[in-house]
């Protein structure tokens, strides 16, 4: 298996993926044409020929256990990319490897198996079966897999509890709010225990408050489950809240891939810089990003914090008297320290870039 980081194997690998729409594109777009020049020139040529290059030469790796967010404006190609990755549609060219297995070469039978056992999918429109109860909706994919009644109801109840819908097992979709329906969709997609989870704008039909709650819920679930996730959104705030890494798409091309803090610090061009100008550094930079290996003791008002907390939290602590921080990871090992001054510098930098 390829390794992008020493201890994080690659779950999903996408190599030079293209999807071109248009009359007879599948027949008329030849692979050698796609490879006949630099991708931007090829894509301009395709457009002149009346084709729509929806995904242009996309390459990236998604690591085991990471939330990989694909972000872009409407029409930038996000859904098309996701559909090519899950092979809901056929790409025009490229390679998609799931745990090293070439998905684009998989037989229809193998694809069905993979979809049933290894991939979960959640879409914006919840896609629940209206005539089935919550319990039966969640148990449905297990029925398709051929699990016994006892087994599938037990698992479905477990998933319903996981998404906080205990007590609503006998309700029907129309009796639930949008947020609750999406929870059922999430429970259903998790029922088969997929290692890879595709989410296409799962919260965008929800109003802002519920959306925020669902994002928190999603992060809580992910902490527990540690799935590998490809998450599509057009909402930059959502992308920055959820992502381990973000891929930014513009007109079919991925123009930057990076951790939220790297994108903020070093946007690849003015387009990306404008996109992220409203994002607060305080909610994008984590303690781990500014910790240094110094071993300095900042005295009795030094606090211990997790490496995943945002600087926003550190600012609040500094305001109430903290003199510095000892930063630890989830296993409790010290990864570094942060002095009060560094926290205040991030605050200052955030003020400068937003004024
Ligand atoms: N079946 C199709 N036939 C022709 N063109 C298509 C088809 N599906 C998508 N497109 C075009 O491909 C481009 C990318 O569309 P896509 O739906 O992937 O974008 P998106 O970023 O997901 O947009 P949104 O956020 O609005 O869903 C658009 O120009 C769209 O019009």
Image (cartoon, grey):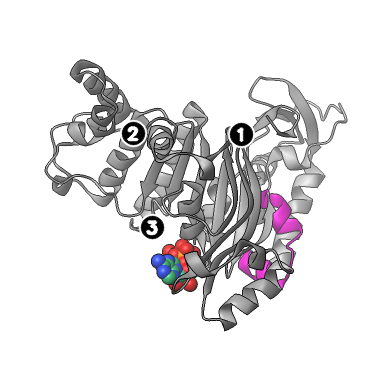
* 3D distance between C-alphas at marks 1 and 2: 31 Å
Residue span colored magenta = 259-277
The residue at the point 18 percent across, 32 percent down is 136
**Quarter containing ligand 1?**
bottom left
The residue at the point 26 percent across, 31 percent down is 144
Residue 163 image label: 2
Mark earlier in primary sequence (2, 3): 2
Does 29 appear above or below 236? below
Question: Where does the image place residue 182, in percent across and percent down from the top left?
Answer: 31, 45
The residue at the point 51 percent across, 56 percent down is 91
Question: Where does the image place residue 4, in percent across and percent down from the top left?
Answer: 73, 37
Tag 2's secondary structure? loop
In this figure, which residue is indicated by the disc labeled 3?
204
Does 85 appear above or below 11? below
Looking at mark 1, is its residue's CB closer than 8 Å to ligand 1? no
Can you see residue 279?
no
Q: The N terminus is located in which quarter?
A: top right
Does 145 appear above or below 42? above
Question: Where does the image place residue 133, in percent across and percent down from the top left?
Answer: 15, 36
Mark earlier in primary sequence (1, 3): 1
Magenta span: predominant SS is helix
* 3D distance between C-alphas at marks 2 and 3: 18 Å
In this figure, which residue is indicated by the disc labeled 1?
100
Tag 3's secondary structure? loop
**Quick check: marks 1 and 2 in contact, CB under 8 Å?**
no
């Amino acid at each position: 298996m390829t390794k992008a980081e020493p201890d994080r194997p690659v779950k999903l690998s996408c190599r030079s993926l293209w999807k071109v729409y248009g009359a007879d594109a599948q027949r008329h777009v030849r692979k050698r044409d796609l490879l006949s020049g630099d991708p931007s020139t090829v894509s301009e040529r395709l457009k002149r020929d009346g084709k729509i290059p929806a995904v242009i030469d996309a390459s990236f790796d998604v690591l085991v256990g990471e939330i990989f967010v694909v972000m872009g404006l409407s029409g930038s190609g996000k859904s098309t990319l996701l559909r090519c990755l899950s092979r809901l549609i056929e790409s025009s060219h490229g390679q998609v490897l799931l745990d090293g297995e070439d998905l684009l070469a998989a037989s229809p039978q193998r694809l069905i198996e993979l979809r049933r056992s290894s991939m979960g999918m959640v879409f914006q429109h919840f896609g629940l079966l209206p005539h089935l109860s919550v319990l039966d909706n969640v148990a449905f994919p297990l029925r398709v897999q051929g699990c016994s009644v006892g087994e599938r109801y037990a698992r479905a109840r477990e998933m319903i509890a996981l998404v906080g819908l205990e007590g609503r097992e006998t309700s029907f979709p129309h009796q639930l709010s949008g947020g609750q329906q999406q929870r059922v969709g999430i429970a259903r997609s998790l029922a088969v225990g997929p290692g890879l989870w595709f989410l296409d704008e799962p919260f965008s039909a929800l109003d802002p408050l519920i959306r925020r709650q669902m994002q928190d819920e999603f992060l809580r679930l992910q902490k527990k489950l540690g799935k590998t996730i490809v998450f599509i959104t057009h909402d930059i705030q959502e992308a920055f809240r959820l992502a381990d890494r973000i891929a930014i798409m513009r007109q079919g091309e991925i123009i930057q891939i990076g951790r939220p803090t790297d994108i903020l610090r070093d946007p690849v061009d003015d387009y990306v810089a404008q996109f992220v100008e409203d994002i607060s550094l305080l909610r994008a930079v984590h303690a781990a990003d500014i910790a240094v290996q110094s071993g300095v003791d900042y005295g009795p008002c030094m606090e211990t914090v997790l490496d995943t907390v945002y600087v926003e939290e550190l600012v609040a602590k500094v305001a109430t008297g903290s003199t510095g921080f000892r930063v630890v990871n989830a296993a409790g090992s010290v990864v570094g320290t942060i002095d009060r001054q560094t926290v205040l510098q991030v605050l200052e930098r955030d003020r400068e870039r937003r004024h």
